Amino acid sequence: MKQLTFFIGLFLMIAPFCYSQHKSAVKQKPKVQAQIKQYWFVMLIAGSNRTQDSATAAKIQEGHMSNISSLYYEGKLKVAGPFGDDGNWKGIFIFDCSTKEEVEKLLNTDPAIAAGRLGYEIHPWWTAATGSFVPGKPKK
């Protein structure tokens, strides 16, 4: 019985402190709605010219990967990746750009798009500017 009384007393002493810490932490978090920002979602699709020989296709792919890296370190490309099946959708990009025209200009720097191996669809897309979507350039 003494142990139970001790634990109840301990709980009553600690509970207000824990609640006040939780309450102040909640107050410090910015509202998610205030963090919403527009990005550009690009669906990469199979292009109209996928007839290159394997050596040429490999060279185009190497340039494609290099371009992705450059755009990422410029802070323009936030997400990039292929799909795991052999469908018409080949991959996605998510850009942090001001305009659709800026996205198109950056897409045209991609050797796979320039060669016609990939095409694209651009859509405005919104999410919270946290995690991978924090504005600015990533650290190398």
Image (spheres, helix red, strand yellow):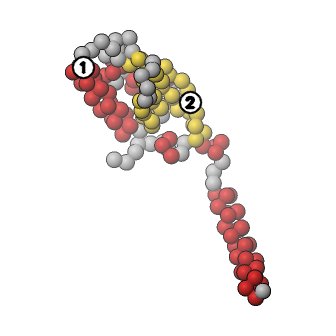
- Amino acid identity at mark 1: Ser
Would you identify the image quadrant in which residue 3 lies? bottom right
Residue at horizontal 27%, vertical 29%?
Answer: 62
Q: Earlier in the sequence, mark 1 or mark 2?
A: 1
Which residue is under mark 1?
Answer: 54
Would you identify the image quadrant in which residue 91 lies? top left
Q: Left or right: where does residue 18 sit relative to residue 72?
A: right
Q: Nearer the viewer, mark 1 or mark 2?
A: 1
The circle on residue 90 is: none
SS for dot 1: helix
- Amino acid identity at mark 2: Trp
Residue 116 placement (x, y as % from top left)? 35, 15
Which of the pair 83/14 is nearer the observer?
83
Name the residue furthest front: 1
Q: Residues within 10 Å of mark 2 (few under 14, many from 20)?
A: few
SS for dot 2: strand
Residue 109 placement (x, y as % from top left)? 34, 24
Residue at horizontal 58%, vertical 37%?
Answer: 127
Question: Compared to 56, does 36 lie above or below?
Answer: below
**What quarter of the picture does the N terminus occupy?**
bottom right
Residue 4 placement (x, y as % from top left)? 75, 82
The circle on residue 125 is: 2
Q: CA distance from mark 1 to mark 2?
A: 35 Å
Name the residue furthest left: 55
Residue 63 placement (x, y as % from top left)? 28, 27
Residue at horizontal 35%, vertical 32%?
Answer: 68
* Count of numbered tags: 2
Q: Left or right: where does residue 36 sit relative to residue 51?
A: right
Which of the pair 128/92 is nearer the observer?
92
Query: Could one spot residue 81 in this view of the protein?
Result: yes
Residue at horizontal 42%, vertical 32%?
Answer: 81
Query: Could one spot residue 102 in this view of the protein?
Result: no
